[in-house]
Image: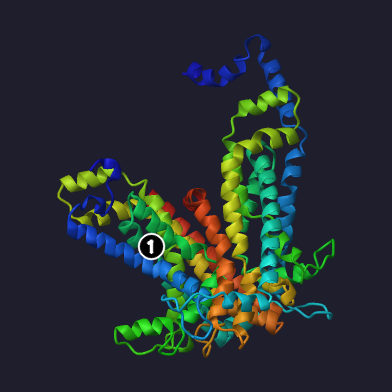
Amino acid sequence: MSLDQAEPVAAPAAAPGPRAPGRGRAAATARQGRSRRSGRWWTPWLFLAPALILFLYFKFIPMANALTMSFQEVQPYLGNKWVGTENYSTVLQSHGFREAAWHTVVLAAGQTAGSMALGLVLALLMEGQGRRLRFVRSAAFLPVVVPIAVVAELWRIMYHPTGDGMLNSLLGLVGLGPSGFINDPDTSMASIMLTGIWRGAPYDMMIILAGLTSVDRGLYEAAKVDGASRWQRVWYVTVPGLRSVFSILFILAAIRGLRVFTEVFLLTNGGPDGSTEVVMTLIYKLGLEQSRLGVGAAGAVLLFVATLILTVVVQLLRRRESK
Amino acid sequence: MSAQTETALGLTESRSTGGRILKAVVHLLVLIIFAGPLLALLVSAFGHVKDPTQLSIVPSGLTLDNFRIAFDQGVLAYLLNSFLVVGFGLLLQVAVSVLAGYALARKKFPGMTLVLVAILATLMLPEEILALPLSLILSDLPVVHFNLIGTLAGMIVPLGAWGFSILVMTEFMKDVPRELEEAARIDGAGDLRIFAQIILPMCKPALGVIGVFGFTMIWDQYLLPLLVSTDSSSYTLPLALRTLRIDPAVTPGVVMAASLLALLPSVIVFLFFQRSFVSGLSSGALKG
């Protein structure tokens, strides 16, 4: 028993053979060898320095500043004044912020659910080999690589509110009246969501397709032998096999949804009538247009806490599930 | 059908005419939904200027008028800005990532876990949330007191370190065999030589992945250029689209022409490097 345990430990030390007459010497040579091998202690830090300096300047210091600013009244030239949690209560009590938070949650939830559902359907429909399939998949993926600013301008024109707008003329073909899309407070949120799903679904499709390759093909055969229908196969074999893929996609998409800015900024900038104001467009307006940096920072910190909580909760759920 | 090609829906098995038609219809529908709008963009960019509101799939005759007007509006200068930002940004990002990846993959040192955790943390820190303090920092960098607002450098330097490419590089460099490195050390090579002549040349596939992803990421930047630029002389092309649109003299066709120029580079990069793009996408997402 004790020999069995000692052996694997002793083996590497004994490997050099003639150079290792005693255990102490062997360890010393090994240590010497290692320090020579890995050079001076600061070598790795030299290689890491550019990355660490950039992260410090553009990630960690801004984060620390956001935290301090959120407890201050930021006054350029006059010096900042410590106001405790006043900014937070201002933010939490403001009707505008609560509206924006609600819009953000609705948009994030809608886009996440829509993109994942459509992505799954697309992936299932376009799984497999063949030249045409590959072509269709690449074409469907294009919206993901198109810059977000271009997507927004394109959809803005497609959403043209009169009858001769592109989407409205399509609606006209099936006998539906012209919709105001992003110009109508009733449909503006759904329109932004639709644009987000258009850009998000192909991404989810690609990830799900990658996940599908790891589903055990033998299980499909077995299910077929057992007489399972197509839908039973998807429901009992494919979907459980994709569980971890779904949870990762969910975190990624939900976080992307919470921090949504560019699409909304370009499509509606929060309008009409504040119907699409999200947290980030509000923070942008507070900070850069009204110079209320402290209040804006408090909003940003709250948004960060929300993303953090979401990530942790989903990770915990995943861990419990896998047990 | 062999077990290898078996799919969830089993659509590949359908050899019947009905099944084939159904598949073709599905593919056509997918193409219309996802590529259709982009085709409309293409067509209206080359279409006539007269129609001010409508995008159409049916070309109304080919013309370069939209591009001519776009160039008169200074689109070429914006495109040049975009190229400068993506060129220098990518160069910096790749350099920073391979250096950091080398240290993390090939060295063992106290504090390594902390560095890894810090890098992972930056991936969870959305740039949007840092927007306000970042704009303050860019106007007066701590210690060195540079003002980067209004300069292209302000759009480039913050993108230099990206957690994703550092982690991709680290994972890849871990797989380079130790023996090669040992042999070089015995021959008296230092860290810099081992890095440049042994590790780096073996990482070409990973360089492809971080190059493609870095390019797409930088080309897609909107908020950072928005924070940094003060006037149109430092606009990148995506930023300029909005100014173009607001100009009442500019028709949608012109905006679409400029949009085409703005999307072409990333689409070309994607089409050329599809393989590394897709593999990086799935490995990045499924590992993270």
In the picture, residue A18 is in which quadrant? top right
Q: Nearer the viewer, residue B4 or A229?
A: B4
Q: Is residue A111 visible?
A: yes
Q: Nearer the viewer, residue A188 or A54?
A: A188
Residue B24: x and y, percent? 28, 61
Give neighbour class at mark 1: few <14, some 14-19, many 20+ (Cα, 10 Å): many
Q: Is residue A265 visible?
A: no
Q: Residue furthest left?
A: A227
Residue at point 60%, 84% (across, down): B250
Mark 1 lies on a secondary structure that is: helix
Question: Is A34 above or below relative to A259?
Answer: above
In the picture, residue A229 is in which quadrant? bottom left
Question: Is A44 above or below relative to B272?
Answer: above
Residue at point 68%, 17% (across, down): A26
Is residue A34 found left or right of A107 in the rendered image?
right
Q: Amino acid at mark 1?
A: Gly
Q: Nearer the viewer, residue A142 or A263?
A: A142
Is residue B169 found left or right of B15 in the rendered image?
right
Residue marked by disc 1? A119
Residue at point 66%, 15% (across, down): A23
Residue B140: x and y, percent? 81, 68
Residue B226: x and y, percent? 67, 73
Is residue A50 found left or right of A214 in the rendered image?
right
Question: Is B157 above or below relative to A33?
Answer: below
- Describe the colour scheme in one phrase: rainbow
In the picture, residue B76 is in which quadrant? bottom right
Count of residue discs: 1
Residue at point 25%, 54% (across, down): B11
Report in which chain the residue with disc 1 lies.
A
Residue A53: x and y, percent? 75, 54
Q: Nearer the viewer, residue B48 or B135?
A: B48
